Image (spheres, rainbow, N blue to C red):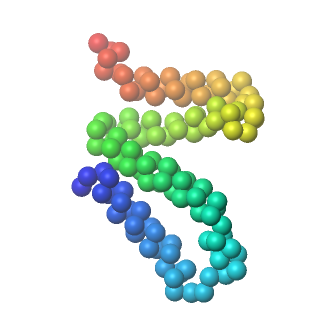
């Protein structure tokens, strides 16, 4: 199955499972308020599109295109990208230990990804 269709199938099943209680019951006042807030819906929709949909789709493409262990290692290193984003978005300064850990993680991912070119 194509990675995009697999992602679409997974996200549709998740949406049905999450929306079923909402559609079968009466929504609370807080939920009605959230659904009426356009800014909330826009940011939530962007988060859904960028996180699960695009993220899972690219994960499936990576698994289909390369060794699963390498793809898994690369995806698992994504929290390393949070360190510079925390600085830009929140102004939070990461410790030197966080930067050293990120450098070690990225070095490991690089070595795994390019091991065939490195070994000759």
Q: Residue at x 28, y 38 (%)?
A: 65
Q: Residue at x 58, y 34 (%)?
A: 80
Side of 18 where 117 appears, left or right: left
In the depicted structure, whether residue 1 falls above or below residue 83: below
Percent coordinates x, y for residue 18 in the rendering: 51, 72
Residue ranking furthest to the bottom: 25
Residue ranking furthest to the top: 120
Q: Residue at x 68, y 73 (%)?
A: 33
Percent coordinates x, y for residue 107 in the rendering: 50, 22
Quarter holding residue 73: top left
Side of 45 where 85 appears, left or right: right
Which residue occupies the foreground of this view, 11 or 41?
41
Quarter holding residue 43: bottom right
Residue ranking furthest to the left: 1
Side of 39 where 111 appears, left or right: left
Which residue occupies the foreground of this view, 111 or 36?
36
Percent coordinates x, y for residue 5 in the rendering: 30, 57
In the depicted structure, whether residue 97 falls above or below residue 38: above
């Amino acid at each position: 199955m194509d990675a995009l269709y697999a992602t679409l199938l997974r996200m549709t099943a998740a949406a049905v499972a999450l929306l079923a209680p909402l559609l079968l019951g009466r929504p609370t006042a807080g939920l009605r308020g959230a659904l009426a807030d356009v800014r909330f819906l826009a940011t939530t929709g962007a988060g859904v599109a960028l996180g699960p949909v695009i993220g899972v789709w690219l994960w499936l493409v990576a698994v289909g295109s390369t060794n699963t262990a390498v793809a898994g290692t690369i995806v698992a290193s994504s929290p390393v990208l949070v360190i510079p984003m925390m600085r830009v978005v929140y102004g939070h300064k990461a410790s030197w230990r966080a930067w050293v850990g990120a450098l070690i993680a990225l070095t490991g991912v690089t070595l795994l990804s390019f091991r065939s070119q490195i070994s000759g």
